[in-house]
Structure formats: structure tokens, C-alpha cells
Image: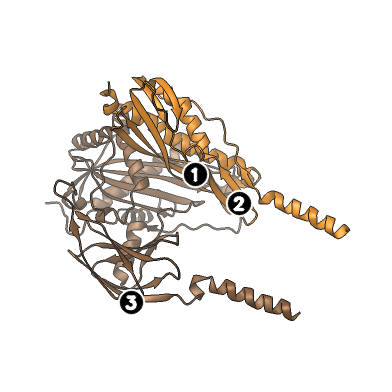
Amino acid sequence: MRASALLATLIIVLAGPCQAGTLKLPDPPVIEIDGAEPLPLVVSLSIPDGVSSCVHTVKTSPFDKMRYPVGTYTVELLEKNLATVFSHVVGTGSTPKGTPADVVLELSIESFDAAIPHPAYNPYTASVVYRVRVKDPAGEVLFTQTTSGSGQTSKGMMSGFKAQQLAAESAARAMNDAMRQLLEGLLDSRELRAAR
Amino acid sequence: MVVRVLGLVVSTVVILSSTPALAGRRTVCLRVASDPPGALVSVLSDVEAGPRVVAGVTPLEKRLDLPKAGRLVLRLERRGFVPAMVEVAATTHVIDVQLERLPDGARAGGGGPTDVTSVALLGPEITVIRRGFSRERVSEEGSADVRATVAGAIARHFHGVLEVVNLPRSGGVTSELEPFLRDARGSTAVIDPIRLPFLATAPRLETTAGRAAARLAGEMAGAQAVLLVTGTQNVETAGMKAGKVGILAAGTAASYASGFSRAATSGDAVFVYDIHIPAGSSGVLLEAILVDSRSGEVLWLNRGRYRAIHSDRPEDVDEVVTDLLTGIPPGEARLP
């Protein structure tokens, strides 16, 4: 009886770390772009199925995983910053039909990669590639752009004690970097300036 | 006891048989040709995800492993032609493919940096990160030093071969060329350096603004192409080194282009690579891209991880730059 209880306790203790830990990413920031003047367009944001739910998993040991909520962060980041580029944002979702938008913006996550270093004091790195397509209401593609972002951080010999925080920070940096370029690209787009 | 031993033997056999290297894989000796020749042959498997495998350029003879399950497929690619996929069976020994030209009107693009005699050098955009015992920070001074060192090495590398004009990276010029930097970074991330010269159509910078910025850079320098070198260098401080006594991380002077060149000249080996470069704790990760300033076409790109760059060791920097810029210009190109 005592042996069974001991075994059960052992299983529970061992099973705890086996569960994938979802990283707590920092709140997506508002990205400041000097001299940005929103385009006088009404945009509808289209998030394809799979983007919001995109999660990247890194196996850190035979018993442990880290899960990066890449999709959730990306969508929140985009929603928070779209007003920098477009004067009006209406309707978001996987199929924002029937919205009186001038253009529909569709975002996809082409790739995401993250490295959890061994030994733990080495840099925590992440990279992401976003692709954005802007279409007119008829579905004609007006503009596409692929942006690549990267991030790195570490706390030297102390890194191992803050592994989850550092992994989250490097991922957020990479996504912020790619999103900044994406927003700048939209602002520079001649096609969008001529769209109205 | 007997049951336990039997169980151990059975499980060992199962583990060994599921290990491809020990499972006695079937191999096939293949002769692959194409009309026209000069097509890149990639080996694809529909069941095993893994690094990319290139067998070489047609015509070639290779011994390839057949997977126990699933199919083995060869992909043949050549600029201006529709890519061909050919399935390999255990009985296949000769593959001869007639490549089909792209339809009329399809833009194939050029064959690489063959007609380039002058280059506008943008950057190098290299960031040095100093990693200390308890924190890391970007070193502005170190970054400027490494940028100047690499720029000097690039000038020496092309001396007498290509004209190199350094573009300023200050004032209003920076913002005007920003779309080029964005597009170039995006291209570097998604284009496979080995496949680039063989892709059916030459990729271009993606946005109109990016191509206009490339044109502007070319006009400013009076150059046909724009070369951008970017990278991140991690340098460990004395405190960090003291903190990890006994553990060494050595960089390797290795890039895609030189790796492929070595494999191609060595004859019998297939070139196995992965587009992902593993993160390193020290050294420099460099990426370089050459873009036709007139059309925005990506002519060449390469990336690699090297030993850290130090301005007081110019010979080492020359070695790194020579490896990174493998492929530009191609052998015969010289200044008139």
C-alpha cells in the first residue's frame, strides 16, 4: 500500500515537468515609427485559420518542452499597430466578409524558429518570417511583402535561472522586429498609396 | 529470468532495426542526365523530414539510399525550364529527363552575377553584442570597428576584379534605401542559396519600393549591382570567459556556397545541408546578398557562421570574406 502511494507520488512529481510549459510573452508593444502618416484607407484584417493558433514547440529535455504562442502574440501585435498604417480598421477574423473595406490585409507566419541554448548561458535566439498580402475588395492582390525578424538575449551565467523569460523575450524581439519592417513596408507601398 | 532476457533481446532488435543506418538500407546506383545538362538534382523523401540533400548537377552518377517506406523522388531544376520530378525505384539505374522550357512570356531572368563589373556596397550592417558575466549589450564601438574591418576586406577581395563603391549610411540616404534593406533581408530569409542559380525564374526584390531603392543605390554609386552584408557577432567579455573556464566554442569558417563547391569537386559525396544555421555562442553569423540594381533581381546570396572578426587580424578577416563571397564574381569575370 505504502509502495503504491510512493509510486503514485513519484509519477505525479515526474509528470509535472513533462507537461509543455507555455511561455508568457510580454505584452505586445505599440511600435513607434517616426513620421508615419496613416494611409487614408479602410482596412479589414483577415487572419487565416491556423495563424492565431500557431504554437512553436521546442523540446528542451526528454521531460520538458517550451511552447511559444507565436500566433496569439502576432495577431495582438498586428491589431495593436495597424492604426499606425491605416486610418480606419474594420472587422477582423478569418473571413471578414461584407465589411465596407477599401483593402483586405492578410497575414501569414511563414516560419518561426527558436534556440534554447545548451549550456544555458549561451544566447537565446529566435527568428520569424511574416508575409503580408493586401488585396482589393475583388480579391486582386495589390501588394505583398515578406519580412524577416530576429532577436537575441541572455543574462550571461545567470541565464539558466531565467530560461523561460529569456526565451520569451528573444521571441518577442524577433516578432517586433519583423512587424516593424512590415508596418514600414506598408507605409512605403506605392501600390497602397494609389489604391484610392 | 528467461522472459526478461528474451524481452531485452527483442527490444534491442526492434531498436536496431528501426535505426536507418543499421537496418540495411537498400541503395541504388543512378546515372542522371538531362537535356539540356546543368540541372541541379535534389533528393526528396516524402516520409522523412530532414536536411536537404543535393546530389549534384547533371550529368552525374550517384549511389543513393532508398527509404524502407515511402518514395524517393529526384527534383531537377534549371533556370528557364519547368522543374521536373522523377520517382526512383529499386530497379531504376538510368534517368534521362527532357526539360521543358518555361512558357513564352515567362520571365526567367539572368543566370547570376556574370555581367557585373561594379558593385555598390551597402553596409556592412554588422552588430556586435558583448556578452558579459551577467548581461549582454550592443557595442556601438565594436560594431563600427567590425563594419570598417569587413568593408576593408571586401575592397581587398574585389581589388582588380570588381569596382566597389561604398555607399554612405547616414543622413537622408538611410531612409531612402530602407525599403531595399527590408526586401533584401526578406529575400535572404526565404531564398535557398544553393538552389538560387537553378530556380526556374530568378527571384526579384518583392516590393516596388524595394526595387526603386535598389535602382537609386545603383545610380548613386554608378554600379550595376548592390551588395549588402549583414550579420551579428557575439563577443564574450573576460568576465564571461572566466565564468566558463574549460568550455570552448570554436567557430568554423563555413558557408553554404563553399560547402557546395567542396562537395561538387569532391566527386562522390552528396551535399547535405539545412537552411537553418544553428545558433552559436560566439563568432559571427554573416549573410550577403547581391541584387541587380536595374531589375531588382537577386543575383547571388550566401550565409555562414565564422570565427569572430577582429580588426587586428586582417588575414583571418580576408579568409572569412573570401569564403562568404564565394561565387561572385564567377571565374572569368574581370575588369576590362
Chain letter for the residue marked with disc 2 in the picture: B
Q: Quadrant of residue B81?
A: bottom left
Q: Which residue is mark 2?
A: B242
Q: Secondary structure at mark 1?
A: strand
- Give the number of the mark in front: 3 or 1: 3
Task: Return the residue found at the far bottom.
Answer: B2
Secondary structure beneath dot 2 equals helix
Q: CA distance from mark 3 to mark 1?
A: 45 Å
Color of chain A here? orange
Q: CA distance from mark 2 to mark 1?
A: 27 Å
Secondary structure beneath disc 3? loop
Quadrant that contains the N terminus of chain B? bottom right
Extreme residue toward the right, this view: A2
Q: Residue at x 57, y 33 (%)?
A: A26
Q: Residue at x 54, y 74 (%)?
A: B17
Instruction: Report the side of A193 relative to A153 (left or right).
Output: left
How many angstroms separate mark 3 from mark 2 (CA)? Answer: 60 Å
**For residue A31, side relative to residue B99 (left or right):** right
Q: Which mark is residue B91?
A: 3
Residue B310 visible in image? no
Q: Mark 3 is on which residue type?
A: Thr
Q: Chain of mark 1?
A: A
Does B19 sit left or right of B123 as displayed?
right
Chain letter of the brown region: B
